[in-house]
Each structure stands twice: as C-alpha cells, then as structure tokens.
Image: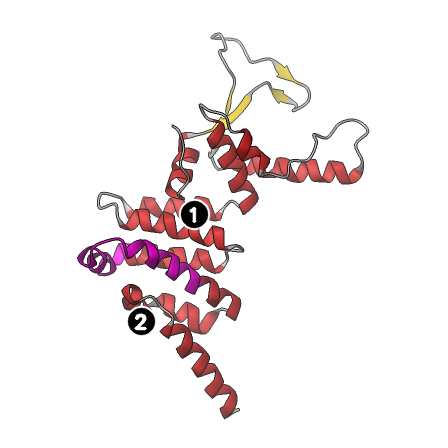
Amino acid sequence: MSDQLDKDWRDRAALIIKFPASLVPLVGGPLAELITETIPRLRQERIVEYLRELNTRLENLQKEVVKMALEDAEKVDLIESGGHLAARATSPVRIGRIAEIVFRGLTNNEVNFVRRKRLLGLFEEIDDDEFLILNAYGQSYGGDGSQAWENIDRPPPAVLGSSADELDDAKLYDLGTENLLRLGLLEKNYGHVKRGEYPPFDPQSDGFKSRIGISYVGRMLLKEAGINLQF
C-alpha cells in the first residue's frame, strides 16, 4: 500500500513540476486540486497541455501584465473555467482553441468576465465537427468558403430511396446545424418578405424557405478562438 501511495505522490509531484512558471500562482488553487485529486490521468494531461498552450501565449506579454492578470480573481476564475473545459476536450486543436479564448479574455482590460465566460459556455456546447461547420459558414460569409467545406465530411442529403445508414448519417449531420442554430451561432435569413406576408413554404424542410448563415455571435466566437475571418 505504501509503495502505491508513494508512486501516486511522485506522479502528482511530476505533474506540478511540469506547470509553466508564469502560471505557478494557480497551483495552489482549485485547478491544482482538479488536476491532482479528482480526474483521471488522461484529463490531467489535457489540463497540463491547456496550461502550456496558455503559457505560450502569455510569454509574449510583459511580466507585469501577466502578474497583474494572475492577481485578479475574475481572470483567475476565467483560467480555471478554461481548465475545466480543457479536461473534457478530445483533441489538441480544441484545447488550443480554449486557450486562445481565455488568453484574449485575459488581455482585454475592458471585458466583462462574467460575459466572457459565456463564450466558453458556447464553445462547450459545440463539438469539433460543429466547430468546423461554423467555421465553414464563417469563411463563406462575404467570401468563398469552399475550401473550409472540404474539411467537413458531409453526407449526401436524405432522399426518397436512401438507405437506413444514409438516413442516419444525414440526420446526425443535420443535428449539428440545428444545434448551431439553437445556440444562435447560425441564423436563418428569409430574404425580403413584404409586410403581412410569409416566406414561401419549403416542403423538404417542413418550414419556411430560408438560407442559413453565420450570426454575429458566431463570427465573434470564431475570432475569439483564433480563426481569421475576412469580415
């Protein structure tokens, strides 16, 4: 038993040593407890990677700016919120996006941190596939987004005669778009409709005919996650 306890202690100590120097003040807080006590090894590694990503960005700032950020309770809370989200991330790219959102919040002195955390909350609500879909709509906004769409495994639309597997694939893909619409990251544009009239009915979607595009909030989330947009 003592050997196992000793091994656990060494493992935890090794993780603490790996922390970036500029983030040492966080080691004594809830994020350290999350790393060393409450989550399995894989999630520990994700948080360590998140802290490394964040530190890479913070290294470009003056030390005094970093010091002030880590002494601000709201900014530390933002970092910890990013850590909780990173613990559930399933890819290094996603962890990098989380670190970018947090970093931009830390370096914006006029930001409302309660509201800034809403961006993290929105990011938490979408998976990697939905982020790619959102990015494709973002790149298509005012420009040619064909290259962004090439990165998405889009199934053919479900039609009469489609197999059960094809129907499943199409419906699961549509769920991603529906979730982005639900969150307000995408929006429907019904075109010019005269007052007192309704848009044409679309029997395929069983609703009014519309065109889907990225919303302002969707563009804001992409930019905060480090995506360059033309508009």
Specify the amino acid type for callout 1. Answer: Gly
Question: Residue 206 appears in which quarter of the rendering?
Answer: top right
**In terms of secondary structure, where does tag 1 sit?**
helix
Residue 87's mark?
A: none
Residue at figure coordinates x 46%, y 26% from the top left: 141
Residue where numbered disc 2 is placed: 28
Residue 8 can be seen in this image: yes
Residue where numbered disc 1 is placed: 121
Tell me where residue 194 appears, x and y as whole percent: 49, 7
**In terms of secondary structure, where does tag 2 sit?**
helix
Tell me where residue 27 appears, x and y as whole percent: 33, 70
Q: Nearer the viewer, residue 203 or 148?
A: 148
Tell me where residue 205 appears, x and y as whole percent: 65, 24
Residue at figure coordinates x 45%, y 46% from the top left: 123
Question: Residue 151 appears in which quarter of the rendering?
Answer: top right
Specify the amino acid type for callout 2. Answer: Gly
Between the residue at mark 2 and the residue at mark 1, the CA separation in whole angstroms equals 25 Å
Residue at figure coordinates x 41%, y 34% from the top left: 219
Does the magenta stretch mainly form a helix, a strand or a loop?
helix
Q: Are marks 2 and 1 in contact (CB under 8 Å)?
A: no
